[in-house]
Amino acid sequence: MSAKAEIEIIERYCKGCSICVEFCPTKVLEMDAFVVKVANADACIACNQCELRCPDFAIKVHKL
Amino acid sequence: MAKKVALLQGNTACAYGALYAGCNFFGGYPITPSTEVAEVLSEELPKIGGKFIQMEDEIGAMASVIGASLTGQKALTATSGPGVSLKQELIGYACIAETPCVIINVMRGGPSTGMPTGPGQSDVQQAKWGTHGDHPVIALVPASCQEIFSETVRAFNLAEKYRMPVQVLYDEIVGHMRERIEFPEPGELEVIDREAPSCSPEDYKPFDPSNGDVPPLAAFGSEYRFHVTGLNKAADGFPTTKAELVDAEQRRQLRKIDANIADIESYEEYQTDDAEVVIFAYGSTSRSARYAVNELRKEGVKAGLFRPITLWPFPEKRVAELAQQAKAIIVPELNLGQMNLEVERVAKGACEIIGIHRVDGEPINPGQIMAQVKEVV
Amino acid sequence: MAYDYEKHIRAGKLPHIWCPGCGHGIAMKGLIRALDTCGLEKNNTAIVSGIGCASRLPGYMDYNTLHTAHGRAAAFATGVKMSKPEMNVIVVGGDGDGTAIGGNHFIHACRRNIDMTYVILNNYIYGMTGGQFSPCTPTGHKASTTVYGNPDPIFDISKLAIGAGATFVARTTAFHATQIDKLIAEGIKHKGMAIIEVLDDCPTTYGRRNKFRSVVDMMKRLKEIAVPVAAASKMTAEQLEGKVLTGVLYKEDKPEYTEQYAQVIERAKGA
Ligand SMILES: Cc1ncc(C[n+]2csc(CCOP(=O)(O)OP(=O)(O)O)c2C)c(N)n1
Ligand code: SF4
Ligand code: SF4
Ligand code: SF4
Ligand SMILES: [Mg+2]
């Protein structure tokens, strides 16, 4: 399976709330020392849930 | 051409003075003895496309006035003691956000509901100290209907020129008294509008001190977009807690007054040149004092009247000089001792300061003042 | 393309001050998308707030922004709108700001049906001051000033707005992110007072005291309690126990205040 989107994380803005991790349907994201990181890029289905729910403008979904 | 004259009540004169100054927004809440200001403006403002709104309370009224001013309007509110107490919160906001506006306080007795229909002069210290924090204050105290007209115009001018709220205080007696008024022709009295920014919108900083202590104020809805807050702020209008910025901002605001005393100060002296006893009186009380001076002079008593028209900033320099010259300064006021404290502070013991105080809803009559003067000389 | 939120945000203002997981950020994104949908011109739009965490929102927005005093936003906004009826006026604030100290201004702005869009972020608590109970803290819940459980009944903000005369009233939650912008956009397009209540979360001062293990738990609760109005009509009272209705709760066409005042001006000029 190949990634449907490129996930950009603006680490400076991320406050590590883990909302994006929880609501990603395909478990693309993971917490790493209170900042989110892309752990499983290929699984991304470009659903935009993470970008939509991030309270901190810290995650952007660039559709491929 | 003969000037237009009319027999007007003080409150009506105030409303027409506001219109002369270009007032185009009034936000208020009814309260005796100020209500006529609102009534007249509710009728007159829409005729010129201006706006009148009766808000849900005095806090809301003050808020609407500040909101209106930020869109570039010349905004007014009018109230009395209990209403002024409510407005204090947002008078402070207008101070920190440097928003021009005029607040009319037709004074009655207090505290609380007090005597709604009786005169008072008990808000004169509140005008200076009523809201929390350090901030500049301008308060004007006209004593006749004609002067209410012209001082309301001057209040708008000072508000616009120095970007701050200006209060006009007069007591119920002057507010409800009818006197002959001569309407100044357009252009006869100076009318000042706030300075608009000349920089490009991208460079605009609403509190930029680099070109003087009164930064130009843009209007919401123009091409300038800006932020306004009641928090301590930096030149760009955004909150800051940086010690040196907060300190500089607060001191700049006080400088608007301190560096312009000559422009803001206004008082009248009557027979003070050789006066041995000076009566310091303002508002309706100054009318009794003037009568007393005339009577005393007939009896050979060297009495004089000092009448502040700008009450705050306090005319410190001149009052200090008079304290050097006179045996005593008599301070009649419709309160239990307010401006006498300021006179004492400024006189620094150079002469005796004697207050005449009354809060029973009755005016101070000339006889009372004359008796006190005679006791001194 | 990712959504371009930055185009509405003042340069250099992010990251914002809100705590990790605070729902106010989600609501702010919804507001931005709504402003975009409606294509409001920045110079011609004012965003007004009171005091509180929610009320810090306008400071980030590249519009005319007015951060006023606690509870007074609706009254300041009324002055702006009366003066320049051609401007779009948006109010943003918290549950405490809007319904406790600002309750009087709130209901009277609703009553006048003055054309503005009031987005009220209801996180059930006074967040900014550390979690004292607000008029929206559920009875029995814990706040820093109700350690034995809150004895106060609550305000239902939307019902309050309808009762007071607002002509567009809608509710959603921070979980229902896409509904936030749809409802705000509808509110902006509505002529008259539009109230959009967004139930959101304050993990820091409310969640912690009320046994939510995480902000994700709070989000899940918002998901569970929300029932769209259409669905609710087919549900029994029992099924609706503990639920809140979401969507457009009320809409009515009534004369708008600044238009009414324009007629006053016409009459005065004609007189
Ligand atoms: C006149 C006044 N009283 C009290 C306060 C203190 N205060 C600041 S914010 C706030 C509560 C804010 O709660 P809410 O409006 O619900 O916003 P939130 O912080 O929850 O987003 C209070 C009580 C104040 N700033 N001004
Ligand atoms: S776009 Fe959807 S699938 Fe991709 S990371 Fe975000 S939430 Fe997960
Ligand atoms: S939702 Fe945003 S702030 Fe929270 S962890 Fe994900 S990227 Fe970070
Ligand atoms: S205290 Fe609560 S409302 Fe305030 S920023 Fe933190 S989470 Fe948000
Ligand atoms: Mg709250």
Image (cartoon, coloured by chain):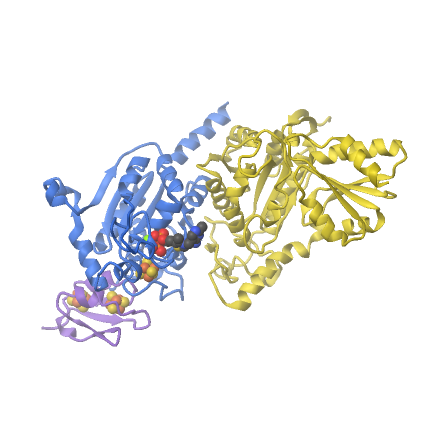
Left or right, C32 with respect to B21, comes to left
| Rendering coords of residue C84 (x, y %) | 45, 42
Q: Colour of chain C?
A: blue
Q: Quadrant of the N terminus of chain C?
A: bottom left
As displayed, is residue B295 above or below residue C99?
above
Left or right, B273 with respect to B237, comes to right
Q: Colour of chain B?
A: yellow
As displayed, is residue C207 above or below residue B58?
below
| Rendering coords of residue B300 (x, y %) | 90, 35
Q: Which chain is purple?
A: A
Left or right, B101 with respect to B142, comes to left
Q: How many marks?
A: 0
- Tell me the residue at 53%/32% (across/down): B31
Residue sitting at the far top = C271
- Tell me the residue at 49%/24% (across/down): C270
Nearest to the observer: residue B300 or residue C34: B300
Nearest to the observer: residue B296 or residue A27: B296
| Rendering coords of residue C229 (x, y %) | 17, 43
Can residue C162 be seen at all in this image of the molecule?
Answer: yes
| Rendering coords of residue C26 (x, y %) | 28, 58
As displayed, is residue B23 above or below residue C11?
above
Left or right, C50 with respect to B154, comes to left
As displayed, is residue B369 above or below residue A37?
above
Can residue B24 be seen at all in this image of the molecule?
Answer: no
Nearest to the observer: residue B217 or residue B256: B256
Nearest to the observer: residue B165 or residue C208: C208
- Tell me the residue at 46%/25% (across/down): C267
